[in-house]
Amino acid sequence: MLRSVLQCHRLPRSFRFRSFATATSFSPERIRNIAIIAHVDHGKTTLVDQLLRQSGTLTSELPSSASPGDVLATRVMDSNDLERERGITILSKCTSINFQGNLINIVDTPGHADFGGEVERIMSMVDGVALIVDATEGPMTQTRFVLSKALSRGLRPLVVVNKVDRQTSRVPQVESDLFDLFATLGATDEQAEYPLLYASAKQGWASTTMTPSSTSMGPLFDLILSHVPAPTHLPTTDPFSMLSVQLEHDPYLGLLHLGRIHSGTLAVNDTIWAIDSEGKKIGEGKVKKILIRKGLEREERDVAGAGEIVSIAGIKGLSEDVVVGVNATLIRPDGWDEKGLQPLPTTPIDPPTISIMIHPNDSPFSGKEGTKLTSQLIRQRLLKESQTNIALKVLPGPTAESLEIRGRGVLHLGVLLETLRREGFELCVGAPKAVFIRDEENPGQWLEPVEECNIIVKEQYAGTVVEKLTLRKGTLVSYDPSSDDFVKITVHIPSRGLLSYLAGEFKTDVHGQGTLNHIFKGYEPVKQGLIANTGRGDKGSLVSMVNGVSSGYAMAPLQARGVMFIEPNTQVYPGMIIGECNKPQTLHVNPCLKKQLTNFRTVMADDKLVLGSPRFMGLEEMLSYMSEEEMVEITPKSIRLRKTDLEGKGRRRG
């Protein structure tokens, strides 16, 4: 049963298991626990690569047996298939480095706001953070989010301005923006006096000055040892306790619980309990293995003490239906009064803001590509996922076979759906909607989520972007011109208004010369008069009215009606959306007409068919694009747009 619990949290193949064990553990004075936090694409994972290689944990040269054309692996911490395909970090991962007799535990965190839950829960494991900031972009939305979480826990960050070797870097302005950001977030005097380093993770150096005084990451190693406090405040003589912050799955050991030992020591074969946030016992077991990370390998330990980050194997729920999940407190029962068991405090996370409805696939192609089709299998898989993905909420849907899934954003939910389809699931997904809640102080009033958007765009397109966001009840907060004719715009806008704009209009408005990043700001009273249009704007849809295979002969004249989503020789069915209509209407067409062959011949050659390139959309783009009367059909091999009502009463011929 556990095999289907954490498919997306399985350890990568590159994490090799060492069979030998070490009996000694590091004293707290020799331990440093630090998290690497930053906005997406500011260089976190590349910087961790350099730390691993320059410390000797990973090889920095190809072996003599390497074949011609072989290159060193990069972004080694992004080991998940989806992470490598998308070029982003999705899951928090921990590794360790032995440097000058010290153990440095490094946690690589996601940089996208939709995966903020991964960042929030690991803050309890670290005693310091390294904030990485791009020397060109400066502090962005996720920078503000992750930094606020670190400051609220009393952590003292160190700052690394990365990519200073670029010609577009603007270090003085970035330093000024950083100081303003710390002041805005209410940093204490001690936190505001952060040490600053300049670096180029790509070139592999860090320095206290803009001109590199060294060709290595040595200054960063020294700063971590001197600035990040050792976990000496943790009691070493108290009974063992640890908060589980992440679950992993090993094909041989089963479920592994990752966390930092909060007190005492733990040894192999010790009996431990698991208790929930209310102090109720939910699991128990005997410790089979204690594992630590060293680079990309896992090593066994006979014993581990307070301050160390370890993975523990052997804990099981009290019944087969119970999985000891994230935020469970692991304790050794001897030394504790059973009636006085106290769970360790957990970090509250921001609530989900976007919801979708999930249904079993009921299209004519159901069961042709997937192996897991029933609502019961989908429900079990999502409930297991919610035990590890704490930013995800699973609720009953309006029908017995449907479920409501709530998450941080379209990307957060899209990654989950992509994981399901790769596991063999078939399902249909409704349009995403903003999650409304009641005002606790005024129960008669509803609140809606509001996002803070940071847009960097060419100045000539800025007016159009601001106008579109204002029409969606956005409020302009700042408008700052920068270098190279770019401007930085900050807007507060309801989530339901932002959903439609992100799908397609923004890319068109900025002509590919702009970026938009957003993060949850808070709940505010519902904005009246906001009509949350779909991502297609005022366009309609072209819907197939037949079952068959599309042909170029039939699709050629349909190009005058709109933009096609399919190619010739594509299987279609009645109710499947095959294109975007130029007019705001649903047009039912036949894309499967074949040319009639007769005995009549003519000297005139047949007209050559010229078909334009179809528009292919990814899963997240489809989720934002579709309207409320449409769904996305997801299978292991295909992603299709379709009408919710496949019967299509009142169809019109095109």
Image: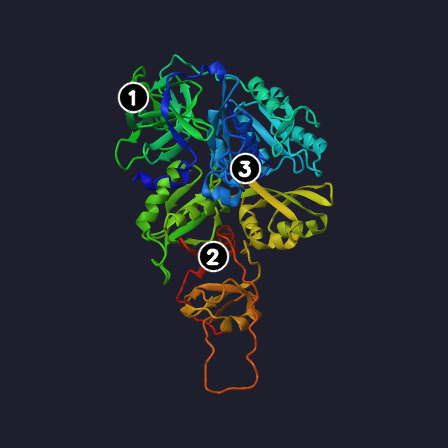
Q: Is residue 108 left or right of residue 647?
A: right
Counting from the top left corner in percent of width and height, residue 363 is at 37, 61
Viewer-side residue, 423 vs 482: 423
Q: At 67% from the left edge and 53% from the top edge, which residue is drawn?
A: 464
Q: Report the amino acid beneath label 2.
A: Glu
Q: Badge 2: few (under 14), some or many (20 or more) residues near its Cα, within 10 Å?
A: some
Task: Look at the picture and state if 483 lies above or below 564.
Answer: above
Name which of mark 3 and mark 2 comes first in the sequence: 3
The reply to whether callout 2 and callout 1 are in contact (CB within 8 Å) is no
Name which of mark 3 and mark 1 comes first in the sequence: 3
Q: Report the amino acid beneath label 3.
A: Gly
Give residue 314's quadrant in the image. Answer: top left
Residue holding disc 1: 269
Question: Going by the picture, which residue comes out furthest to the top?
Answer: 237
Task: Look at the picture and state if 467 lies above or below 563.
Answer: above
Whether residue 327 is visible, yes or no, is: no
Q: Report the amino acid beneath label 1.
A: Asn
As measured in the structure, the alpha-carbon distance from the residue carrying label 3 to the one carrying label 1 is 38 Å
Q: At 52% from the left edge and 34% from the top edge, which residue is drawn?
A: 62
The quadrant the N terminus occupies is top left
Q: Is residue 406 left or right of residue 526?
A: left
As measured in the structure, the alpha-carbon distance from the residue carrying label 2 to the one carrying label 1 is 55 Å
Residue holding disc 3: 111
Residue holding disc 2: 628
Colour treatment of the image:
rainbow
Task: Look at the picture and state if 404 lies above or below 16.
Answer: below
